[in-house]
């Protein structure tokens, strides 16, 4: 016991000893054991391979980062999810330099037999000058009914006009020398037309065509009105209203010069002209009242009342009837220029159908050979209008789908191709925008076949997808003989829907790829370095004769 008591006690290990012990254990699990620097050596081939591997790793890393920063498009095609009865909105703005807004009509039909004619609720018109300059404000024809151009004489009124004309002819035949007989309606040619314009205080001219049924219906009424009006304003009077007519089949150049597009057309000439100046533009005064004997004679008497004649006779001068005064009459309208811009939208079912724009009137006839349906499509697209950002996203998808690196500008300027002005073809949402189709001969109808596809896009960073209708177009012009020339837009919706999402690569996949690049290049280059080093050693041994 004493020996045990005198033996030295073991003290617990100090902290440095514990640290060394822990570090030793930790080093035992090191996967990446190091070789002392003095036990390794560098070689020139190894340095070359190391520099090459570093450059290769850097190049692959930059490429991978660029790929990660660029989202990719994923596309799938599904059956169109539209429900039965869903409507498709068709938006259009088409300019016709030779079709008057007075007669421009928009018709819609589809394969199910639904046809609507002369739409006015969602269609607006704006008159154009010959050079395409807009004239005045946009016109809304919603309130114009079938009698917008006045009603025709009924059977009794028509019979009364016929009797009056026959009685007048019989009276003239019995006493041809009597100067008190009122003049009949003057049948004008280009030379007498100018003469009567200068000589008459007010000249009413009926532009007609013998083949037109509305003209034949109006003829006895117009002749009878001429007899009654010329009775009040006899030949030789200083101030008088004169009724005349022009046969447009015989004097086509005159009718074309006066911009007559439908028959019958009644123009009002005061002070030798039917032009009404509005700013720097000129309109035409045209009669649109009832086509009855009473209405026409009352209109003529209203233009030149008795008090104006009396005041003019006192001073032995000519009465003045301004065109502005004529326009104040409810039966007179200004025909604003020869052209028309037709703007609006229609709703159609998702079945094959058409939108037609042509001339139409319940009280006029048209000469097909004189109709020019040249037109410019300012825009024509389906669905809602895409904003600039949405449109650019659509163009990015199209460019990526085509294998391009840069999306073309959908707002590029137009170019000219063989007489047809083409717009930016990259804009698949509005393929026809900016395209002009010209009629190079008479009786030409322009047909456009549009095949539409509903595309649903969800760009990167957006949680809400949006719909865009794209379409392809094929156009041609043909000569028609059995119908009026028109602009036809046929549409055919596709039964499939394209769903497109713009996605970025997941971050974990990006990191995994980076590590694979670094580790893979390092390992492969290490194998290459070992192969080169061993080969060089073998070559040295062969040189020293020590091999084998």
Image (cartoon, rainbow, N blue to C red):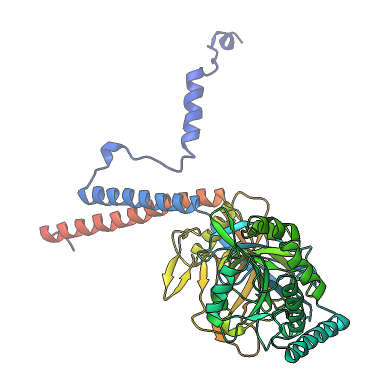
Displayed quadrant of residue 548? bottom left
Q: Is residue 327 visible?
A: no
Q: Is residue 39 visible?
A: yes
Return the residue found at the far left: 544
Q: Residue at x 46, y 35 (%)?
A: 27
Q: Residue at x 29, y 48 (%)?
A: 50
Q: Position of residue 429 (x, y in %)?
A: 59, 64
Return the residue found at the far right: 156
Left or right, 229 with respect to 424, comes to right
In the image shown, does 114 or 62 lie closer to the viewer? 114
In the image shown, does 159 or 107 lie closer to the viewer? 159
Q: Position of residue 86 (x, y in %)?
A: 78, 68
Q: Position of residue 356 (x, y in %)?
A: 67, 76
Displayed quadrant of residue 305? bottom right
In the image shown, does 320 or 99 lie closer to the viewer? 320
Q: Residue at x 56, y 86 (%)?
A: 478
Displayed quadrant of residue 359? bottom right
Left or right, 30 with respect to 99, comes to left
> What is the quadrant of the N terminus in the image?
top right
In the image shown, does 78 or 466 lie closer to the viewer? 466
């Amino acid at each position: 016991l004493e020996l045990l008591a005198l033996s030295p006690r073991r003290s617990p290990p100090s902290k440095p000893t514990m640290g060394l012990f822990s570090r030793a254990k930790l080093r035992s699990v090191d996967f990446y054991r190091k070789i002392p620097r003095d036990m390794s050596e560098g070689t020139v081939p190894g340095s070359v391979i190391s520099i090459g591997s570093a450059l290769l790793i850097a190049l692959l890393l930059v490429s991978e980062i660029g790929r990660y920063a660029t989202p990719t498009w994923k596309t799938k095609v599904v059956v169109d999810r539209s429900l039965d009865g869903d409507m498709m909105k068709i938006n259009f703005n088409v300019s016709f330099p030779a079709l008057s807004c007075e007669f421009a009509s928009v018709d819609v039909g589809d394969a199910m037999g639904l046809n609507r004619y002369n739409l006015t609720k969602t269609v607006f018109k704006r008159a154009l000058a010959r050079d395409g300059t807009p004239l005045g404000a946009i016109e809304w024809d919603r309130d114009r009914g079938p009698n917008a151009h006045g009603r025709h004489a009924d059977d009794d009124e028509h019979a009364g006009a016929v009797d009056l004309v026959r009685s007048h002819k019989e009276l003239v035949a019995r006493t041809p020398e009597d100067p008190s007989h009122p003049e009949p309606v003057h049948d004008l040619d280009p030379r007498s037309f100018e003469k009567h314009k200068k000589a008459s205080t007010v000249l009413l001219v009926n532009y007609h065509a013998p083949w037109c049924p509305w003209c034949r219906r109006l003829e006895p009424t117009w002749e009878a009105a001429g007899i009654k009006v010329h009775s009040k304003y006899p030949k030789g009077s200083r101030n008088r209203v004169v009724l005349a007519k022009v046969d447009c089949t015989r004097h086509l150049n005159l009718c074309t010069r006066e911009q007559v597009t439908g028959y019958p057309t009644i123009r009002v000439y005061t002070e030798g002209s039917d032009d009404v100046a509005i700013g720097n533009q000129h309109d035409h005064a045209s009669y649109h009242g009832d086509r009855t004997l009473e209405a026409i004679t009352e209109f003529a008497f209203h233009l030149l009342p008795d008090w104006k004649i009396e005041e003019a006779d006192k001073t032995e001068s000519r009465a003045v009837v301004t065109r502005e005064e004529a326009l104040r009459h409810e039966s007179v309208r200004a025909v604003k220029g020869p052209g028309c811009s037709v703007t609006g939208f229609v709703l159609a079912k998702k079945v094959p159908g058409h939108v037609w724009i042509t001339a139409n009137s319940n009280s006029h006839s048209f000469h097909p050979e004189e109709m020019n349906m040249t037109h410019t499509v300012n825009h024509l697209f389906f669905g809602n209008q895409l904003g600039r950002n949405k449109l650019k996203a659509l163009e990015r998808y199209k460019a990526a789908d085509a294998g391009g690196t840069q999306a073309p500008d959908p707002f590029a300027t137009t170019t000219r191709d063989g007489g047809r002005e083409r717009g930016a073809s990259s804009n698949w949402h509005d393929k026809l925008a900016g395209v002009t189709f010209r009629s190079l001969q008479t009786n030409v109808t322009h047909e456009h076949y549009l095949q539409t596809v509903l595309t649903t896009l969800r760009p990167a960073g957006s949680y809400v997808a949006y719909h865009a209708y794209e379409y392809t177009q094929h156009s041609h012009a043909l000569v028609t003989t059995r119908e009026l020339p028109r602009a036809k837009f046929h549409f055919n919706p596709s039964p499939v829907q394209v769903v497109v999402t713009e996605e970025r690569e997941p971050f974990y996949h990006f990191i995994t790829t980076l590590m694979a690049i670094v580790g893979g290049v390092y390992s492969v280059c290490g194998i290459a370095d070992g192969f080169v080093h061993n080969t060089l050693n073998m070559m040295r041994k062969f040189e020293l004769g020590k091999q084998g």
